[in-house]
Image (cartoon, rainbow, N blue to C red):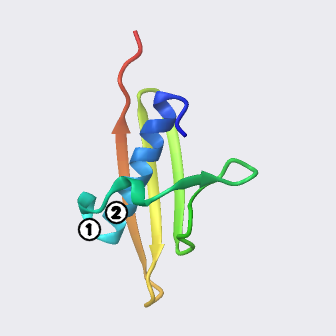
């Protein structure tokens, strides 16, 4: 599923950002969400069409941004930055 530390940090950041945008925090299990990638490598949440996801990596950091469209047509935003362990 996650082949590198960077991939793991990005997936974790994406899941936590989703729950933050939802307003629940980490009260729900992380394995309830699955992050997949389309043919061009764009990440998305499996079965969550109203969620827009972006994951980025730079050095020791992974950042995920999640936009959720509510029924009222308003956007909720979740943003999380995860620090990666330094490589020796």
Residue 32, position as x, y percentages in the image: 41, 60
Relative to the observer, which residue lies in front, 83 or 46? 46
**Residue density around tag 2, few if under 14, some if 14–19, many if 20 or more, within 10 Å:** many
Residue 35 against residue 67 in the figure, above or below: above
Secondary structure of the residue carrying tag 2 is helix
Say which residue appears at 56% left-offset and 69% top-offset: 47
Q: Residue at x 41, y 34 (%)?
A: 61
- Give whichever of 69, 47 is nearer the camera: 47
Quadrant of the rendered structure where residue 52 is?
bottom right
Q: Residue lying furthest top in this view?
A: 88
How far apart marks 1 and 2 lie (CA) works out to: 6 Å
The picture quadrant where one finds residue 75 is bottom left
- Determine the secondary structure under disc 1: loop
Point out residue 43 in the picture as x, y percentages from the top left corner. 60, 53
Chain-order first, disc 1 or disc 2: 2
Q: Quadrant of the C terminus?
A: top left
Q: Kindly identify which numbered label has been placed on residue 19.
A: 2
Give the percent coordinates (x, y) of residue 57.
50, 36
The residue beneath circle 1 is: 24
* Marking on residue 55: none
Horizontal placement of 49 versus 24: left or right? right
In this picture, is 10 found above or below 47? above
Q: Residue at x 35, y 24 (%)?
A: 85
Image spot of residue 64 (x, y percent): 45, 50
């Amino acid at each position: 599923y996650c082949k590198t530390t960077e991939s793991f940090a990005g997936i974790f950041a994406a899941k936590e950002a989703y729950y933050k945008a939802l307003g629940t925090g980490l009260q729900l299990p992380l394995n309830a969400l699955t992050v997949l990638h389309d043919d061009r490598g764009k990440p998305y949440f499996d079965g969550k069409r109203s969620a827009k996801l972006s994951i980025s990596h730079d050095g020791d950091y992974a950042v995920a941004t999640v936009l959720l469209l509510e029924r009222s047509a308003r956007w909720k935003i979740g943003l999380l930055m995860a620090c990666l362990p330094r490589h020796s």
